[in-house]
Image (cartoon, rainbow, N blue to C red):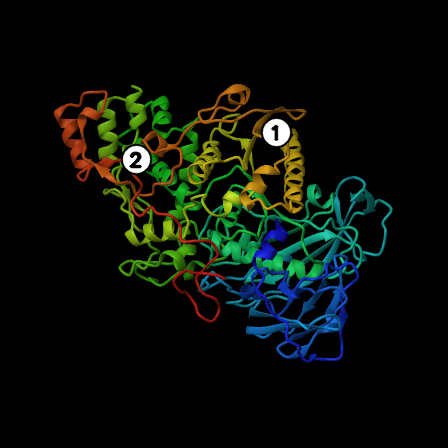
Amino acid sequence: MANRTVRSSIVVAVLTAPVLLLGTATAVAAPGTPSGRHLTIETVSNPRPSLVSGGQVLVKVVPPERTRVTVSTNGHDVTLRFHAQPDGSLLGLVTGLRDGSNDLSARTSGHGPDQRANLRVTNHPITGPVFSGSQQRPFYCETPAFGLPAASQPLCSAPTQVSYQYKTTAGAFAPLTDPATRPADLATATVGGHAVPYVVRVERGTIDRAVYEMAALYDGAPSPVAPDRSWNGKLVYTFGGGCNAGYHQGNATGGVVNDLFLAQGYAVTSSTLNVLDNNCSPIISAEAAMMVKEHFIETYGPVAHTIGWGGSGGAIQQYDIAENYPGIVDGIIPGVSFPDPLSVGGPVSDCRLLDRYFAGPGASFTAAQKQAVAGFASYDTCVSWDQTFASRATATDSCNAAIPVAARWDPVTNPRGVKCNSNEQLANQIGRDPKTGFVRSPLDTTGVQYGLSALKAGTITAAQFADLNAAIGGLDHTGKPAAQRIAADPKALDAVYADDILNSASQGLRETPIIDQRTDLDLAGFGNDIHTTEWSYVMRQRLLRANGTAANQVIIENHATAGEAAAASVYELDAMDRWLTAIDADGSHRTPQQKVLANRPRDLGDGCYLSAASRITEKLTYPASGQCGAQYPVAANTRMVAGESLALDVLKCRLKPLNFRDYPVAFTAADRKRLRDAFPGGVCDYSRPGVGQRAPIGTWLSYGDERTGTTPPTKVR
């Protein structure tokens, strides 16, 4: 898949007229290079030449057989940087790029007509942004958390540091001052069937204002043109969880010193902006991942394929990056997944409103009735949403400790201060409401009939249903309780659908191998956990509806035990690697989507773990059925109870008139009046698309770089 992405991004011009050489240094194509082909030049470390960063780029030149090649950058000969590769190509790290446009050129001589291939590369500063638009300010630095020197705002840059660790025979990681030494308790790893010393090189520095980390087994200084034998040529990119407003660098990445990956020779990378609790924007996360991966390739060499890894908010990033910025990760293994931040916003805000209602006018609801209204396997999940994440919709309740109290928003004393609403990270995409100064919100509860399924099932009475919907209230723009229902900003709705911020699963995901790693936290002693299983099936429903198939998504469930979690991780990583390796080797004329479906390993399919030693394969469905359904029942959530479909992609519903004949119960005259007052414009009609709902405008959208600031989204070429 990585090779497919590179080929699709080449920008090449070929001339057959004789040309003068640009210098005296030349590189010669190796014998065995296919004859009769044209000279090509392409960027490898970032397959999109317009998005290169950091002043350097790894370049590949593919010449005809037995020809001499010269390569230049902005008119300067750089041929000596290129080295012959086993496939007959030439690979070279081109440095010294200036910010903005750079012209790369390759020319041949000596065998047949001379040829020239040109490529324009646009370089961006290593501090970013490249495509995410204007960066947040202020931005508080946290480099000392990684052992890096204290940095200064707004770029938070720090010098790169390299350290070493080794795995002991007791199974722990220990620091190692000199990587050439071999401690007596040094363990070994097995890479490509060969035992290698388990010494790990860890690099830390700053890219895109974030702290990045890279880890790989050490076999001498890494080289982008001569990969070492302790690296298997593949990359795991880790993503961390949460969802918050940002305005700070972060003190943790998704984690890179991980025995599961390193012991098999994988390299591992991540960044603080790939932790959604530091940055609740999949767009910013995609940019950081692109830039860090580019730097990794410029350090270690071409990557066969990249596997995404991480749970919760880490799963959101994988799903959303694969959908909207395909090629950064080739296959994804999202754990305890959600589809995107905005889809979750409805149930989260619902739980805050329900908790408030049940503590007041709804105090007479029984535990069973509360659970039926919420839809989760346990109402404790709603309590947990309210206690842990509902604050992310407020102005300052979720501010990170790195943000000084004096810098935070206050309507009177500091109206221009930092707002810690999680939507702050989407300001470039959604825009701000000029009346409030807050980012426009797509959150909406207008017409939502809370507890509708519970009413139809007879779990709550007509009077309770009427009172619930009359008294539920809403939230104002600061996230505080209000008497009125919540109304979405129309401009916000237009943007989140057009830009695919609410993940439609209709773009890059249709060509992405997915193993959805669903550790069951719904009950099993975790009744208050927010990571409920229905979200895996929400994404499956979106894939089915958008593409006619969800065969590229496999869901594997396991209990929340260390043994089952470890067994699942080992199997899923191996299965994903085999899947991607088969796709990489598929030279057929199938479409990318067909290659993904055709090359899924035969042993890989939906299923579940009955124990750490027993995994069964069977089709998983919603509602749940079969052996896995008995082990892992799947519940619903507040919006599904209110009548929304499993796809859960309607942020603001279209309305239909309130019709009391639609209900299986009789309402009193007083209750009818309360419901008419609660729904003056009607109730949700989920048989129609939501307000603003439309097909997305495309992948690889840019919102501006360090020179242009924030622009309307444009497609990157």
The crowding category of the residue bearing disc 1, from other C-alpha atoms within 10 Å (few below 14, some 14 to 19, many at least 20), is few
Q: Could you tell me which residue is drawn at 62 percent across and 63 percent down?
A: 43
Name the element at disc 1: loop
Query: Is residue 238 among what the camera can see?
Result: yes
- Residue 316 seen in the current view: no
Q: Nearer the viewer, mark 1 or mark 2?
A: 2
Q: Earlier in the sequence, mark 1 or mark 2?
A: 1
Q: Quadrant of residue 31?
A: bottom right
Choose between 401 and 338: the one closer to the eye.
Answer: 338
Residue 406 location (% of width, % of height): 42, 61
Q: Residue beneath label 1, please?
A: 561
Judge the density around disc 2: few (<14), some (14-19), many (≥20) Cα neighbours within 10 Å: some
Reading the image, the residue beneath label 2 is 686
Residue contact between numbered discs 1 and 2, judged by CB atoms under 8 Å: no
* Residue 687: % across, % down: 29, 34
- Residue kind at label 2, given as amino acid type: Tyr
Query: Which residue is drawn at the image coordinates 41% and 55% (left, top)?
Result: 426
* 326 in relation to 161, above or below: above
What is the three-letter code of the residue carrying label 1?
Thr
Regarding mark 2 in the picture, which secondary structure is present there?
loop
